[in-house]
Every structure is written in C-alpha cells, then in structure tokens.
C-alpha cells in the first residue's frame, strides 16, 4: 500500500520522513510503500541466526550483514531504499 505522499522523494528525504513513522516502509521509485508489521520474538531469533551464519562469508568479501532499522539505498537514481524487517541482507 502506497503511503499518502504528494510527489516522489529522494532516499535522503525518505529517511528523514521515516523518523516520524511507526509503520515500516520501503522507498520504491521515489514513493513510500508500506511494508509488513513488526515480527515476533521467534522470527527475530531466526533473523539473528541467519545474520550470524552469513557474517563470516560477508566479512571475507568486504561486506557486512544488516537486518532491521537499517536502510539500504539501491539504484543509481537514489529513489529506492529498502528497510529490512523480515530478512537479512548483505551490504
């Protein structure tokens, strides 16, 4: 579901906009898209285990793992930002 926002925004504006929000959003082509609600404790344990399992390989190739409360800005136009909440990403 798209969040009510008048015009597309850049990733930097999106990150500032997110500070005042309780819900989770990703920025897709400049538009905030509402994502799923927060996870259960069991889900968070699984995410933590996945991050631990991937950490060694990520560090070996100069990357790191991240999960919630971290935005990953993608694309050359700077209008897409993913905020992982149910998965672990390599950055």
Image: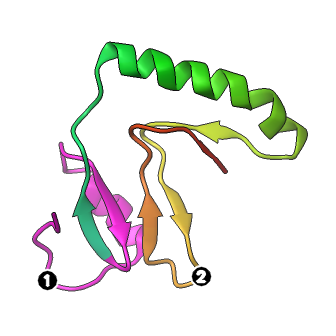
- Residue 75 percent location from the top left of the image: 56, 76
Query: In the image, what residue occupies the spot 33% across and 14% down?
Result: 41
Q: Mark 1 — residue?
A: 6
User: Which image quadrant: the N terminus?
Assistant: bottom left
Question: In the image, is 1 to the left or to the right of 64?
Answer: left
Query: In the image, what residue occupies the spot 36% across and 72% down?
Result: 28
Under circle 1, the secondary element is loop
15 within the magenta span = yes
82 shown above or below 14? above
91 shown above or below 81? above
Query: In the image, what residue occupies the spot 81% across and 28% down?
Result: 56
Q: To which quarter of the image does residue 16 belong? A: bottom left
The span shown in magenta is 1-30
Q: Mark 2 — residue?
A: 76
Q: Nearer the viewer, residue 66 or 47?
A: 47
Q: Nearer the viewer, residue 60 or 42?
A: 42
């Amino acid at each position: 579901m798209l969040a009510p926002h008048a015009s597309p925004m850049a990733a930097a504006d999106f990150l500032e906009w997110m500070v005042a929000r309780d819900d989770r959003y990703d920025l897709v082509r400049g538009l905030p898209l509402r994502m799923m609600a927060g996870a259960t404790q069991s889900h968070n344990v699984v995410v933590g285990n996945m991050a631990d399992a991937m950490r060694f390989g990520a560090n070996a190739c100069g990357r790191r793992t991240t999960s919630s409360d971290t935005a990953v800005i993608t694309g050359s136009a700077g209008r897409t930002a993913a905020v992982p909440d149910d998965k672990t990403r390599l950055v």
